[in-house]
Image (tube, rainbow, N blue to C red):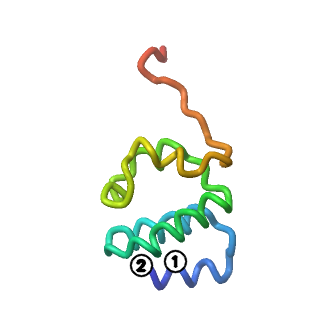
Amino acid sequence: ALVYYKKFLTLHEKDSIVMYSIARLYARMGNTTEAIKWRAAAIKNGFKYSYVLENDIDFKNIDPPLKRKALFPAAKWELYPNRANATF
């Protein structure tokens, strides 16, 4: 999968979702340096899903879940509504 994601990036150089997917793959492979590098690139290029960053189990051995968002204070995060009190 990694080869195909990187090939895709040659055509779509700023795709933050693909960059984050690459970061997750590296984290799963135990390559912390590359995982952190690609996660930072994803955020720099627009990956703004704080819920994903705070809860992604692929990064559990790299940094604590509740501190992940704090690692990137300058990012503009997508906020999610509290669904506990939602009415449908």
Q: Between residue 72 and residue 24, name the one nearer to us.
A: 72
Relative placement, left or right, of 58 versus 72 is left
Residue 26 sits in quarter: bottom left
* Residue at the spot of label 2: 1
Secondary structure of residue under mark 1: helix
Give residue 75's position: percent from left, percent from top.
66, 48
* Residue at the spot of label 1: 5
Give above or below for 69 relative to 18. Answer: above
The label shown at residue 29 is none
Asked if disc 2 and disc 1 are in contact, CB closer than 8 Å, the reply is yes
Q: Quadrant of the N terminus?
A: bottom left
Distance between the alpha carbons at the discs numbered 2 and 1 = 6 Å
For label 2, the crowd category at 10 Å Cα-Cα, with few meaning under 14, some 14 to 19 and many 20 or more, is few
Relative placement, left or right, of 28 versus 79 is left
Give above or below for 66 relative to 30. Answer: above
The three-letter code of the residue at mark 1 reads: Tyr
Residue at 52%, 45% (x, y): give it: 69
Give residue 86's position: percent from left, percent from top.
48, 17
Q: Between residue 26 and residue 11, name the one nearer to us.
A: 26
